[in-house]
Amino acid sequence: MTQKEKSELTKERLLNEAEALFAQKGYDAVSVREITTVARCNLAAVNYHFGGKRKLYLEVFRARWVPRAERVQKHFREGLAAQGSASPTAVTQALAEAFLVGPLSDEERHRHYQLMTRELGQPTEAFELVAEQVMRPFFKGLAKTLRTAMPEGLGKERLMLNILSIFAMVLYFNFARVAVTRITGCEYDLAFKERLVEHIVEFSLNGLGGSGKEKPE
Amino acid sequence: MTQKEKSELTKERLLNEAEALFAQKGYDAVSVREITTVARCNLAAVNYHFGGKRKLYLEVFRARWVPRAERVQKHFREGLAAQGSASPTAVTQALAEAFLVGPLSDEERHRHYQLMTRELGQPTEAFELVAEQVMRPFFKGLAKTLRTAMPEGLGKERLMLNILSIFAMVLYFNFARVAVTRITGCEYDLAFKERLVEHIVEFSLNGLGGSGKEKPE
DNA sequence: AATCATATCAAACGATCGTTTTAATGTCAA
DNA sequence: TTGACATTAAAACGATCGTTTGATATGATT
């Protein structure tokens, strides 16, 4: 193995472990020593390869988060195309499927949304990256897709709020797993996650009305 | 002013400033020196009055967060009673009103949900407090209220998921204000917050279907 | 084989962290 | 007024933080 390849492996390990730790504990709660220890390399490696802790954090988003988000988006577009329709039902179904199941492993998805939620609550430079390279093009395309299938009277803002509300549930049920488990008593096994997808799709499409018609007062 | 009263004022200032900083930056990103500086007291005051940084954090939840949550719950119950009905519509309306407007000032509410969301994503001892003293009784009562108004076939789990989904939106739109502003282009002024309440209520009740009927394919 | 560039390493840097210690100050009862 | 007590204040503690340094080892180049 060449020198260059070994160096690349070290960078890979650092990115992987850094992402896992940042997602799990947040930027401030993770030390460079902790990262380099689990990545089995020297303390100075972070500064040597990335130029510092902050830049490693940003590189996690550049080299890991953004590409993964693009994979999810691609999966969504293909799923929507496969349905042959851009109705709200089809879009919602495809959205929920892509973001809750999609091309990611469960562990990957958990990390993904943890990082995202942290940035949402406390935006840093990384959020600029995500907003510009991932969110903006996605929302632009999605709004265009949906506009043709929804009533013309529906303003752009309402459209955005609808999409954001679906996101809210997706992020929440991934971010707050521990709490959700505690409240519902359900572990995040395959069966529960399937029910979760079903619920979010149904709720997004029909709200409370979908899972039970309102009794007359 | 007596000695005791002055001491209480110091504790009050510490609790207030600590809560604001913890909500804004998260536990790890806030130092005891920062808290004591903005609270205009000595560095040692945190240890003297609360026994340490961790215990101050817990006291923020005990003395500030839990009582505030109980105020919100009281407001919800009264709002529901005023409607004279426990239909899903009435409950949703009362929920959204209590949690998005309710008895709290905007700043208070923002802090409240920031702290909550941080605990959801990374539960500490404080989450135990919240789960036991606030969430458990609330969900218990809410489930009981809703069960009579919803179809009998609707399982307890689905009921929980519906409530959690409303929570998800409430938390999200409070926690991710910066991002929401960035995406929608809307500032969190009074008008936008009113539209937000309207949206969440409508979305919770009718999903996407409520804000625009699906076009035939 | 000799030279150079690169990656890794142990060690130490100054800064800041939460906490403790010790002294000074103010308050209230006796 | 004096002694006891509670609170504040300044200073220092050891630990850990992110980063830098200089030495060493390793692979590539001439």
Image (cartoon, coloured by chain):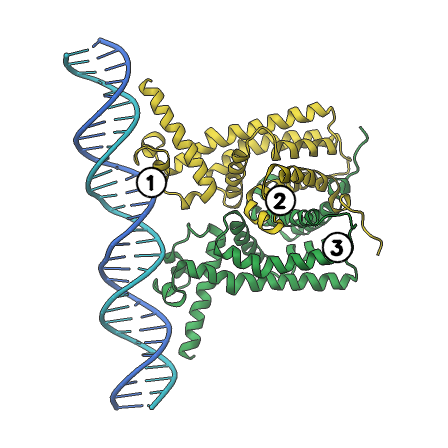
Chain colours: A green, B yellow, C blue, D cyan
> Is residue B191 rendered to the left or right of residue B44?
right
B173 is higher (above) or lower (below) than A38: above
Residue A186 - label: 2
Tags 2 and 1 in contact by the CB under 8 Å rule?
A: no
- In the image, what residue type sits under mark 2? Cys
The CA distance from mark 2 to mark 1 is: 41 Å
Relative image position of residue A121 (x, y in whole percent): 52, 47
- In the image, what residue type sits under mark 3? Arg
> Is residue B176 rendered to the left or right of residue B9?
right
Between tags 3 and 2, which lies in front? 3
Q: Is residue B157 visible?
A: no
Do the residues at pointers 3 and 1 share their chain?
A: no
Relative image position of residue D19 (x, y in whole percent): 33, 60
Q: Residue furthest right?
A: B216
Between tags 3 and 1, which lies in front? 3
Q: Residue A9 falls in which quadrant of the image?
A: bottom left
The residue indicated by pointer 3 is: A147
The CA distance from mark 3 to mark 2 is: 37 Å
Do the residues at pointers 2 and 1 share their chain?
A: no
Q: Can residue A22 be seen in this view?
A: yes
User: What residue is drawn where x is 52% and y is 27%?
Assistant: B67
Subunit of label 2: A
- SS for dot 2: loop
The residue indicated by pointer 1 is: B33
- SS for dot 3: helix
